[in-house]
Image: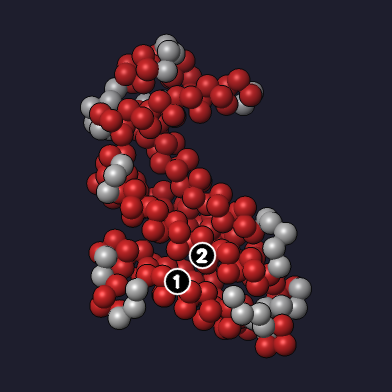
Amino acid sequence: MTAIASKTRERLLDVARQLFASNGVERTTMNDIATASDKGRRTIYTYFKNKKEIYDAVIEREADAIVKRFRDIVCSDLEPVEMLQAYIRARFDVVDETIKASTTSQLISYITLDHKRLERIRLLAVEKERGLFHSMIENGIARGVFDPEQGALIPAIHQMFFQGVDYCHLCDNYDGLGVDPSTLREETVRFLTNTIVLKHTEKQP
């Protein structure tokens, strides 16, 4: 795809996202998107077969934007321990921001109602995140900072734990855990750090 074609596609997605948020997905038509983007219907159909495909692309782009935050951390020059801690804190931030957005963004509300499609996109984002997390752990092991045995277990623990965090945020039921969100956040950072870092290299947050 050329730079111009890519720019046009992004423009269409930006417009579609705004229309989905303001009018709702069902009430937004291909004609609406064409008119608002100053593009003809023929141009839209060059990039997308139908509204469903545009909707999927909008949601996938949102998921990619979330994953990019983790990718930026993993690709940074941070030392392994600092990288792990920054990653975990970013994961908490993403959960918090997503839940807060659901109360203010019509788009997120409409997306949340479409459970099957949202789940497919969520699984795609989780798969991408899993690869980044594994890469970060493997790098720490290769540099002699992370314990190889614990490193084999941490990714699964991380995934299961944040499924619980997602649920707690969604239901706003931290009281049942006897801990507030900020305390849980830092205790999680400390626990995962102490679990995976080899004792002779251990560095507290």
Residue type, label 1: Arg
| Proximity of marks 1 and 2: CB atoms separated by less than 8 Å | yes
- Quarter holding the N terminus is top right
Percent from the top left, x then y, of residue 86? 58, 64
Image vertical order of residue 83 relative to residue 65, above or below: below
Asked which quadrant contains residue 41, the reply is top left
- Judge left or right: residue 183 versus residue 200: left
Percent from the top left, x then y, of residue 92? 45, 63
Asked which quadrant contains residue 151, the reply is bottom right
Percent from the top left, x then y, of residue 170? 29, 61
Q: Is residue 129 visible?
A: yes
Image vertical order of residue 164 relative to residue 30, above or below: below
- Judge left or right: residue 28 versus residue 76: left
Q: Nearer the viewer, residue 14 or 134?
A: 14
For the point 72% across and 59% down, the residue is: 77
For the point 61% across and 80% down, the residue is: 204
- Judge left or right: residue 1 versus residue 170: right
For the point 36% across and 14% down, the residue is: 35
Q: Nearer the viewer, residue 36 or 127?
A: 36
Percent from the top left, x then y, of residue 142? 75, 73
Calculate the distance from the C-alpha at mark 1 to the C-alpha at mark 2: 7 Å
Q: Nearer the viewer, residue 73 or 132?
A: 73
Q: How many residues crowd around disc 1 within 10 Å: few (fewer than 14), some, or many (20 or more)?
A: some
The image's mark for residue 89 is: 2
Residue on which the image places disc 1? 185
Q: Is residue 112 visible?
A: no
Asked which quadrant contains residue 84, the reply is bottom right
Please report whichever mark, 1 or 2, sits nearer to the chain's N-terminal start. 2
Residue type, label 2: Arg
